[in-house]
Image (cartoon, rainbow, N blue to C red):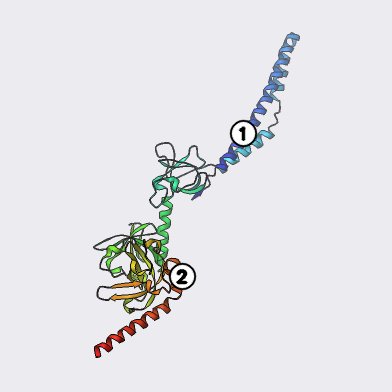
Amino acid sequence: GHVDASPRAVTHIETSFRSFVSAMLATTTTHTSMMSARRASLVSSRSTHGAQRAPARAIVRKAIVSEDVDVGKTGAAYTEFASLLDKYQYNYKVGDVISGKIKACDAKGAWVEIGAKSEALCPTSEASLGNVRNAAAVFDIDCDYDFEIIQDDNGEGCMTLSVRRMELAKAWDRCREAQADDAALTGEVLSVNRGGLLVEVEKLRGFVPQSHIGVRTLNREELIGQQLPFKFIEVDEEKNRLVLSHRLATDMVSAEGLEVGDVVEGMVQAVKPYGAFVDVGGQSGLLHISQISHERIVAVENVLSPGDRIKVLVMSKDAEKGRLSLSTKKLEQNHGDMLRNPAAVFETAEDMGRQFREKMQAAEGVVMSVDEA
């Protein structure tokens, strides 16, 4: 459960404790003064009335024992102090989620004030589910965060906290929810092997079997670094097993129905020095750097980024090899529009595509008439 470990609670207790101690000291001082006065009276009585020494002692003893001390103020302070101690008594245990304030960050991680006797430590390795080298990159000093206690005593007299553990649980929850809703989540292709793809979704590693790769390509290495949608075949947190499908996630008409001259919408999957790979209807097509604009492009990443939704014209198609060659250059009304105003290019893309097809058909007509001659 979540435990309130606000430092303000500690301040409240300390203030109450000081009030309680002050009240006790005031009462003790008053009581001591009264006893001193009685003793002085007794000594005086003895020296003056030696014959009546015994009765005087009895009278003084009776006066001291029967003296009523006003404990109202002391009792109120004690009651408040005891109540606060009971209210803010911390019984931390492993698994608790607590709030704490970041006090400092160093090579070990983040030092967190949680209201205990000493500050707790959130190691850098536990600061995030992602890879971080410095806790200061994750936390801001004097800001409050939630943590899970993962160790009572780390051997240095302080508790060990984690943010990573909580994020990990939330990531698995999101994957289970997506599987239950038959929804797709976007992930990145990390590497390829003979069996399929190793991908990262919600910062979790997963595997895509070869039969579930929805992009046809001769060189699967080209998929590395691409952002693709995936659906979940198996989500098993206990076994740390995540099996996904890109083919099921695309769930759209494949590029087999596309023809040269068609204008289609696609998503940029990856950017390379020589061009960009664009997902078009579940098939990856290459938008070569020379086909992006009529104007010279120095770096593709200055024009396109993974995840961009763009319109492209199908320049050529190799059904046997499953390759598509794409172009935005042919969709430009004015040279350089893709660099300065790509929205205008996409707005008139269908008209420019129609003009391209008409020119292509006219050229084919000329060829046919020459052949007939």
Evaluate whether residue 145 shows in this view: yes
Q: Give the side of residue 59 with respect to residue 224, left or right.
A: right
- Quarter-of-image position of residue 340: bottom left
Residue 133 vs residue 287, the one in the foreground: 287
Q: Residues within 10 Å of mark 1 (few under 14, many from 20)?
A: few
Q: Secondary structure at mark 2?
A: helix
Q: Residue at x 44, y 39 (%)?
A: 158
Residue of label 1: 18
Furthest-bottom residue in this view: 373
- Expressed as whole percent of the image width and height from the top left, the position of residue 347 reads 46, 74
Q: Please state, as top left, top right, bottom left or bottom right, where the C terminus lies in the image.
A: bottom left
Residue 12 vs residue 196, the one in the foreground: 196
- Expressed as whole percent of the image width and height from the top left, the position of residue 90 reads 51, 42
Q: Secondary structure at mark 1?
A: helix
Residue 201 vs residue 226, the one in the foreground: 226
Q: Residue at x 74, y 11 (%)?
A: 52
Residue of label 2: 343
Q: Amino acid at mark 2?
A: Ala
Furthest-right residue in this view: 48
Q: Residue at x 58, y 39 (%)?
A: 11
Q: Residues within 10 Å of mark 2 (few under 14, many from 20)?
A: few
Q: Residue at x 65, y 35 (%)?
A: 75
Q: Amino acid at mark 1?
A: Arg
Give the answer, above or below, for where 24 lies relative to 232.
above
Q: Give the side of residue 330 with respect to residue 83, left or right.
A: left
Give the answer, above or below, for where 20 lies relative to 274.
above
Give the answer, above or below, for where 221 lies relative to 38.
below
- Quarter-of-image position of residue 39: top right
Q: Which one is earlier in the sequence, the residue at label 2 or at label 1?
A: 1
C-alpha gap between disc 2 and disc 1: 69 Å
